[in-house]
Image: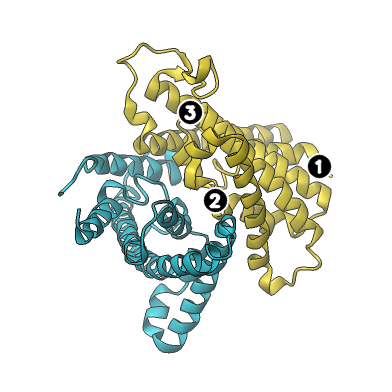
């Protein structure tokens, strides 16, 4: 398999067959928390994609050039979470200064991303699967796109469900979870999908 | 100190998963067999107690504007310890849970309890809070595991009982394997939360009637 094909394979699996939310369950908290409205869901998705791309690159560099030479691989979890937290902070400050429009749009979602397991999950999976630098970045960005796809689809379902009648005990979260289950059922249809 | 109230809060009325809706990623992802559920539940409980105790002990030392960063470092330290111990002594469990062990760092239950309880209360109360919240989480995981395993694979106690195969309760061909797949996780948790909302409302109603 050529290198480009491997990149395309990563893209396909991160977005569809191994969707970050609906198949691998990374990042359920923001998925449930900020999916009541379509536009906020899209904002969150974009923020996550952006941070995941940068974080995958940075954690790969930290792992390759700091942790491995010093034999500190067991410190990965601690090092990665610190890297991610600082990236989120830096991105926030940078956007506030130079791209205020985007900062306004992402606003409150940025700090929340630190505790999003999708970001740390992507960093850890990159190490586990032994991806090189470019593959890691592709995995991070496309994983974020998969997250965005799932959260936008889910938000549009929830907007409709919120107008429907349902049993009292099921109002709010339970019915949302069941809708998510049906969405996951639909995504199961992608399993086994291979273009190469 | 109100130990009984704390216990009830952890178990039901403020159950971390069913009522506070925290830590959903691991709840959905790993509850496919009893072994995984108990292993994950106990790991989180231990980390929760340790981090609650340490954070509570240091609550007057940690400056409040960098407290979240400090909490995350403390939690990540304990998670690494548990991760390494599991790899050394329970390699099967460590393999089953995979990346979800390091992901305990960003499990909102632990950070949530640190912020909401340990940073304001004494060491002993925080330890108890960690224990009860941990038990509430573990029990929820166990219930999820039992339901999903029964409906999805037709067995009980996979990974522990009957040499790891589990005890077969439903004949082969009857269970729907979708229940051990992601779909089943969402559906089971949805029904469980609906059930717990119903129960909590009923208890409140009873309390009100008793108060009259």
| Colouring style | by chain
Chain letter belonging to callout 3: B
Mark 1 crowdedness (10 Å alpha carbons): few <14, some 14-19, many ≥20: few
Q: CA distance from mark 1 to mark 3?
A: 35 Å
User: From the viewer's perspective, is A33 left or right of A161?
Assistant: right
Q: Which residue is located at x 71 percent, y 32 percent?
A: B210
Q: Chain of mark 2?
A: B
Q: Badges 2 and 3: C-beta atoms under 8 Å apart?
A: no
The relative height of residue A105 versus residue A128 in the rendered view (above or below) is below
Q: Residues within 10 Å of mark 3 (few under 14, many from 20)?
A: many
Residue occupied by mark 2: B102
Residue beneath the point at 32% across and 16% down = B174
Q: Colour of chain B?
A: yellow
The reply to whether the C-beta atoms of the residues labelled 2 and 1 are less than 8 Å apart is no
Residue A5: % across, % down: 19, 57
Same-chain check, marks 2 and 1: yes
Q: Of the residues tagged 2 and 1, which is closer to the observer?
A: 2
The image quadrant that residue A168 belongs to is top left
Instruction: Left or right? Give the position of B162 relative to B65.
Output: left
Between A94 and A57, the one lying in front of the other is A57
User: What label sits on residue B2 in the rendered view?
Assistant: 1
Colour-to-chain, cyan = A
Q: Earlier in the sequence, mark 1 or mark 3?
A: 1
Q: Nearer the viewer, mark 1 or mark 3?
A: 3
Looking at the rendered structure, the secondary structure element under dot 1 is loop
Report the residue marked by disc 3: B33
One can see residue A106 in this view:
yes
**Residue A98, image quadrant:** bottom left
């Amino acid at each position: 398999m050529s290198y480009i094909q491997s990149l395309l394979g990563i893209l396909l699996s991160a977005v569809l067959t191994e969707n970050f939310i609906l198949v691998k369950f990374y990042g359920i908290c923001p998925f449930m928390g900020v999916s009541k409205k379509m536009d906020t869901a899209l904002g969150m998705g974009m923020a996550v994609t952006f941070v995941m791309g940068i974080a995958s690159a940075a954690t790969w560099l930290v792992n390759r050039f700091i942790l491995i030479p010093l034999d500190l691989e067991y410190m990965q979890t601690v090092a990665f979470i610190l890297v991610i937290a600082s990236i989120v902070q830096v991105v926030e400050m940078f956007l506030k200064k130079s791209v205020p429009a985007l900062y306004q749009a992402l606003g409150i979602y940025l700090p929340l991303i630190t505790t999003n397991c999708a970001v740390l999950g992507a960093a850890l999976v990159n190490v586990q699967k032994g991806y090189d630098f470019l593959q890691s970045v592709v995995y991070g960005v496309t994983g974020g796109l998969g997250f965005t796809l799932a959260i936008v689809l889910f938000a549009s379902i929830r907007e409709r469900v919120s107008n429907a009648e349902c049993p009292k005990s099921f109002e709010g979260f339970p019915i949302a979870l069941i809708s998510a289950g049906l969405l996951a059922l639909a995504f199961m249809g992608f399993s086994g999908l291979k273009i190469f | 100190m109100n130990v009984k109230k704390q216990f009830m809060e952890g178990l039901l009325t403020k159950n971390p998963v069913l009522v506070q809706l925290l830590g959903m990623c691991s709840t959905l992802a790993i509850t496919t067999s009893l072994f995984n559920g108990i292993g994950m539940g106990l790991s989180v409980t231990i980390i929760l107690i340790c981090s609650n105790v340490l954070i509570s002990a240091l609550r007057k030392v940690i400056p409040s504007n960098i407290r979240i960063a400090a909490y995350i470092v403390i939690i990540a330290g304990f998670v690494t310890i548990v991760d390494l111990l599991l790899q050394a002594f329970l390699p099967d469990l460590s393999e089953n849970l995979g990346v979800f062990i390091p992901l305990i760092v960003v499990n909102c239950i632990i950070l949530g309890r640190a912020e909401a309880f340990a940073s304001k209360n004494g060491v002993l109360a925080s330890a108890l809070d960690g224990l009860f919240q941990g038990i509430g989480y573990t029990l929820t995981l166990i219930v999820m595991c039992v339901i999903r395993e029964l409906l999805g694979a037709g067995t009980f106690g996979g990974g522990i009982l009957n040499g790891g195969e589990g005890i077969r309760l439903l004949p082969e061909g009857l269970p729907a394997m979708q229940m051990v797949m992601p779909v089943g996780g969402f559906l089971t948790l949805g029904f469980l939360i609906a059930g717990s909302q119903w129960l909590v409302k009923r208890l409140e109603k009873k309390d009100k009637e008793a108060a009259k």
